[in-house]
Image (spheres, rainbow, N blue to C red):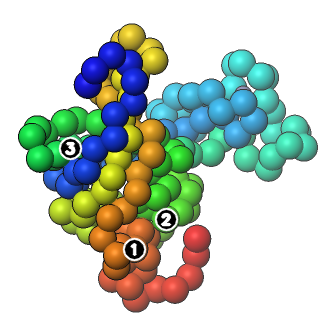
């Protein structure tokens, strides 16, 4: 990486961290909520369940840590919601619901995405504490690429949901 300019590379996915694919945020202001307390309400916007903006106080967003290999090096990168949707083909909530029915969905998603080639644009994290390059955009390079959720539905023989 030179300077703070985003870099675009061609890379292969080596592995995704399937143990933690998403996190919870306030459905109104999208600030992070604690994962361990599902009843907590947002402290920032004082969201409560009577807020007409949403029927749910929280939603999930993708935050996927993964290892990728370019022609010269292996990198650990973090992929947030917008870019991760290209890989998964659905929202984090939809994936979470699918994974509730199919407990091995996340493991399978890792296997499905492993070895896929992408053109990724990476940028240095704006937050100085963040340790991983973040994926700004993802473009699949294989012509027959389909998002993980499509392959998963075929795998589990379902055409419902999402
Ligand atoms: Zn909020």
Crowd around label 1: few <14 · some 14–19 · many ≥20 (10 Å):
some
Residue shown at the point (34%, 79%) measured from the top left: 144
Q: Which residue is mark 3?
A: 67
Q: Which residue is mark 2?
A: 89
Label whose residue precedes the other's in the sequence (1 or 3): 3
Q: Is residue 146 above or below residue 106?
A: below
Place of residue 75 in the rendered image (x, y in percent of width and height, measured from the top left): 19, 36
Residue shown at the point (25%, 60%) measured from the top left: 117
Residue 65 visible here: no
Q: Which image quarter: residue 26?
A: top right
Q: Which image quarter: residue 112?
A: bottom left
**Which quadrant of the frame does ligand 1 lie within?**
top right
User: How many numbered markers are drawn?
Assistant: 3
> Which of these two is toward me, 86 or 34?
86
Residue shown at the point (20%, 55%) measured from the top left: 12
Place of residue 136 in the rendered image (x, y in percent of width and height, measured from the top left): 45, 39
C-alpha gap between disc 1 and disc 2 = 8 Å
Point out which mark residue 137 bears: none
The C terminus, quarter of image = bottom right
Residue 7 visible here: yes
Do the numbered discs 1 and 2 sit on residues whose CB atoms are within 8 Å? Answer: yes
Place of residue 39 in the rendered image (x, y in percent of width and height, measured from the top left): 63, 35
C-alpha gap between disc 1 and disc 3 = 20 Å
Label whose residue precedes the other's in the sequence (1 or 2): 2
Residue shown at the point (11%, 38%) measured from the top left: 73
Q: Which residue is mark 1?
A: 146
């Amino acid at each position: 990486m030179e300077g703070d300019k985003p870099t675009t590379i061609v890379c292969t996915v080596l592995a995704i961290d399937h143990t933690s694919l998403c996190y919870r945020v306030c459905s109104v202001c999208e600030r992070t909520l604690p994962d361990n307390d599902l009843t907590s309400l947002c402290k920032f916007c004082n969201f409560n369940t009577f807020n007409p903006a949403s029927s749910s106080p929280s939603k999930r967003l993708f935050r996927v840590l993964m290892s990728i290999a370019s022609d010269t090096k292996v990198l650990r990168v973090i992929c947030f919601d917008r870019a991760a949707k290209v890989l998964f083909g659905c929202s984090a909530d939809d994936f979470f619901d699918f994974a509730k029915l199919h407990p091995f969905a996340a493991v399978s998603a890792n296997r499905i995405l492993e070895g896929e080639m992408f053109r990724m644009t990476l940028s240095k994290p704006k937050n100085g504490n963040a340790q991983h390059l973040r994926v700004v955009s993802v473009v699949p390079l294989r012509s027959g690429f389909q998002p993980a959720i499509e392959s998963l539905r075929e795998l589990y023989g379902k055409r419902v949901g999402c």
